[in-house]
Structure formats: structure tokens, C-alpha cells
Amino acid sequence: MGTWMAKRKIKWWDMRERANKERTCNKCGWVAFGVTSEYAEAEVKRFNEMYDELTAGEKERYYGSRGASMASYEKCNRCGNNYKDFRESKEDDCPVGCTLGPIIVD
């Protein structure tokens, strides 16, 4: 479990429970789980509040001295395609057991 999740006592399934249906990138086929803009904004705020409490060394070591931003929710984690160019996933788009990242669904 990530350091920030441990400090905030966040369980990985908390994020999954808040997610909408999975989405598939139309450019590369990568699958992500859908979240609302409101949810993404709340997660960015929560992460950055924790991040601001870290020392400069911790920020560099764990996060490359980068806080969270909405940009990470607005593009494909694989090819950088815009979130507006995703479609609802089909059953066979993603094998069971894969790790999915978030993408905005508006």
C-alpha cells in the first residue's frame, strides 16, 4: 500500500467503490476505471494535503517532487489520449486481475 494511503488509512477498495464503469481508450485499447470530475478533484486535494506535509526528501524519493493534478485523470496512462476519446469497455477488453488507473467520465 502506498505511503499516502497508509497515512490517510485509505483502503484500495475505497477507490474502486467510488468508480463508475470501466472505459477503454479508443487510441491504444488501455482500460481505466471511470470516476467523476468531482471525485478526481477531491482525490487531488486529499493527496496534495498529505504531500504538503512531507519533507523535501520524502517528496523526491516517493513522488519525484510532483504533487497530484487533474491532468493525470484527463489522459490515458499509456498513450496520453484525452479522456473524451474513451468508450465504455466491453467484457473482453481487460483480463481479470489487471491493475486499472482512473479516468474522468463526464
Image (cartoon, rainbow, N blue to C red):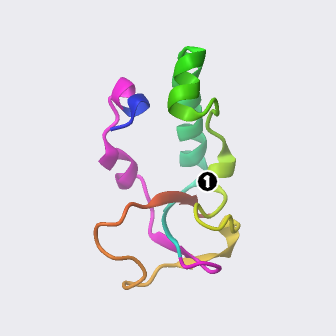
The question of residue 19 being in magenta is answered with yes
In the figure, 20 relative to 41: above or below? Answer: below
Does residue 46 appear in this view?
Answer: no
Residue occupying the point 57% across, 47% down? 40
Residue 60 % position (x, y): 58, 26
In the figure, 38 relative to 96: above or below? Answer: above
Quarter location, residue 65: top right
Q: Which residue is mark 1?
A: 73
Secondary element at tag 1: helix
Residue occupying the point 69% across, 70% down? 84
Left/right placement of residue 48 relative to residue 9 reads: right
- Which residue is nearer to you in this view: 68 or 84? 68
Quarter location, residue 1: top left
Does residue 21 appear in this view?
Answer: yes
Residue occupying the point 58% across, 38% down? 44
Residue 74 % position (x, y): 66, 57
Residue occupying the point 66% across, 61% down? 75
Residue 41 % position (x, y): 61, 42
Residue 54 % position (x, y): 53, 17
In the figure, 39 relative to 54: above or below? Answer: below
- Which residue is nearer to you in this view: 95 or 8? 95
Amino acid type assigned to the residue bearing label 1 in the image:
Tyr
The question of residue 10 being in magenta is answered with yes
Crowding near the residue tagged with mark 1, few <14, some 14–19, many ≥20 C-alpha atoms within 10 Å: many
- What's drawn in magenta, residue-wise? 6-29
